[in-house]
Image: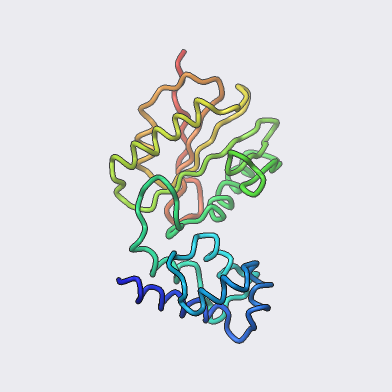
Amino acid sequence: MDIIKKNQLIADLVRRCIGERTLDEACAATGLSRNRLHRLRNGDFTRMPSDEVIMALTADSAEPQNGVSYSDFAKILNDDLQENGHRKIKTQITEIVIDCVVWRWLLSLGDVTIYNNKKNAMRYDLIASVNNIKYYFEYKVVFKDPVNQSYLSRIKMDLITRIATSTVDENDVFAIATNSEQLLAAMKDITLNVKPKVIILLIDNDIDKVKEVIELTQKK
C-alpha cells in the first residue's frame, strides 16, 4: 500500500474517532494536542501515528465515534511492522490485556499487592507481591508465528541480560510473561547463574489464562 493511500485511510479513521466533536473537545478526551489532531485528521503527516497516539484515540475514555478500535488502525499499519526487537504497535495482544491475565494468575496464588506498574516503574512492566514474595515481571510479546530465528535469538539474549543484571532479591521472583511458545521453548534450555528464582508464564493465545509456567534451571 502506498504512503498516500495509507495516510488517507488513517485520516478517515481519525475523522471517525473525532466524529461531531470539535477539535478542542477531542483534545480534552484524548489528551492529544490540537495541532496533532488537526494534522492527523487532514492526512497532513509524514510519520505514521505511534502506538500511544492510536491508543489515545481509541481508548474508551476518548469515546471514539462509530466504534473505531485499535485493530482498525493496526490493519492499515500492519504492513509497516518489522520484528526488530521493538514493539511498534501491538496487533494481537496489548500489555493491558497481559496485565489482566497476570493479575488473575497472581490472585490464584494468594492475596496480591501491586507495588508498581508500567506508568511508574523504571524497568519492570509489573511489580507485585503475593504471600510476602515479590514478582518482577518482564513482558515479551511476539507478533509473528513462527518467529524468525534471528529475532528469537535477540529476544532470548535480551532476556538473559535483563535477568543477569536485575536487582531482584534472592527471595523474590523474576517473572517473564510471553505469548510465544517458541520463546518459552528457547528459554527452557538455558542454565542461569543468578540468585532469584526465574519463571516464565506462557499466555494462552486466546488471552484468557496462563497456559504454562516453568522455572528456569539454575547452576548449583
- Which of the pair 28/125 is nearer the observer? 28
Say which quarter of the image contains residue 206.
bottom left
The x and y percentages for residue 175 are 53, 35
Viewed as shown, does residue 70 lie left or right of 129? left
Residue plotted at (51% across, 78% down): 41
Image quarter hosting the N terminus: bottom left
Please, which residue is most extreme toward the bottom here? 20
Residue plotted at (61% across, 87% down): 20
Looking at the picture, the colour scheme in use is rainbow
- Which of the pair 218/153 is nearer the observer? 153
The x and y percentages for residue 69 are 50, 71
Residue plotted at (46% across, 80% down): 12
Viewed as shown, does residue 217 lie left or right of 131? left
Residue plotted at (45% across, 16% down): 219
Please, which residue is most extreme toward the top here? 220
The x and y percentages for residue 181 are 37, 43
User: Would you place residue 98 above or below residue 115 in this image?
Assistant: below
User: Would you place residue 2 above or below residue 204 in this image?
Assistant: below
The x and y percentages for residue 65 are 57, 80
Say which quarter of the image contains residue 190.
top left
- Which of the pair 66/212 is nearer the observer? 66
Viewed as shown, does residue 161 lie left or right of 197? left
User: Would you place residue 193 above or below residue 83 in this image?
Assistant: above
